[in-house]
Image (cartoon, rainbow, N blue to C red):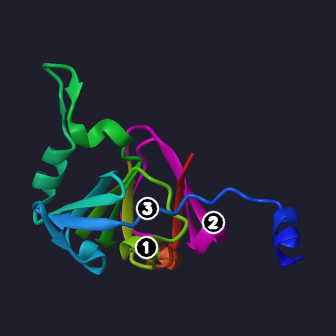
Amino acid sequence: MFGVLLALVPSTPAMAATPEVVATLDGRPIAVADIPDYQCHDLEYPVIRCFRKIADRDASIAVDIDVGVASASLASGVVYVTVYDGANFTGSTFSISQDYDALATIGWNDRVSSFKGRNSESGRFFVDWFGGGSNWPFCCNSTYGSLGTYNNTFSSVYRG
């Protein structure tokens, strides 16, 4: 009888698991919790690539204009915002190409003190996870060196 009941239960497809975020510093594995201590980007998500210097991070996502071929790093997206741990574009940075329901998954929950919109893209920060609470929209290469009462409050971010 139990087998008959199981046969009557509709089957549901397994949900795809969210990829596990991993991080590297200069090509070596680091703890995800250490991401906010460096200059990082997520263009190879779920791999977060981090560097000790902003110039090294930027070089890793550069496009070879002469050849017209993007580096392998750019294959998965375009950076739409770069966040900074300090006011006036100082401190650790993270160049974002993905949407994040919870910035905590990359160690950046409630850490953003300034940011720059990139590549003529737009987006929106939220003070709560999953796009909840108050929000701060940005567009088209805008820069904000100070966030006033929004300093260190952002918990999610989305493109568009």
Q: Tag on residue 131? A: 2
Q: Is residue 60 left or right of residue 105?
A: left
The residue tagged 1 is: 105
Q: Secondary structure at mark 3?
A: loop
Q: Secondary structure at mark 2?
A: helix
Q: Earlier in the sequence, mark 3 or mark 2?
A: 3
Give the residue type that dot 1 points to: Thr
Which residue is more in the foreground, 141 or 39? Answer: 39
Give the residue type that dot 2 points to: Gly
The residue tagged 3 is: 19
The residue at 44%/53% (across/down) is 98
Q: Is residue 119 above or below residue 57?
A: above
The answer to which quarter of the image holds residue 7 is bottom right
Q: Is residue 31 left or right of residue 55?
A: right
Quarter holding the N terminus is bottom right
Between the residue at mark 3 and the residue at mark 1, the CA separation in whole angstroms equals: 11 Å
In the image, the segment drawn in magenta is 118-147
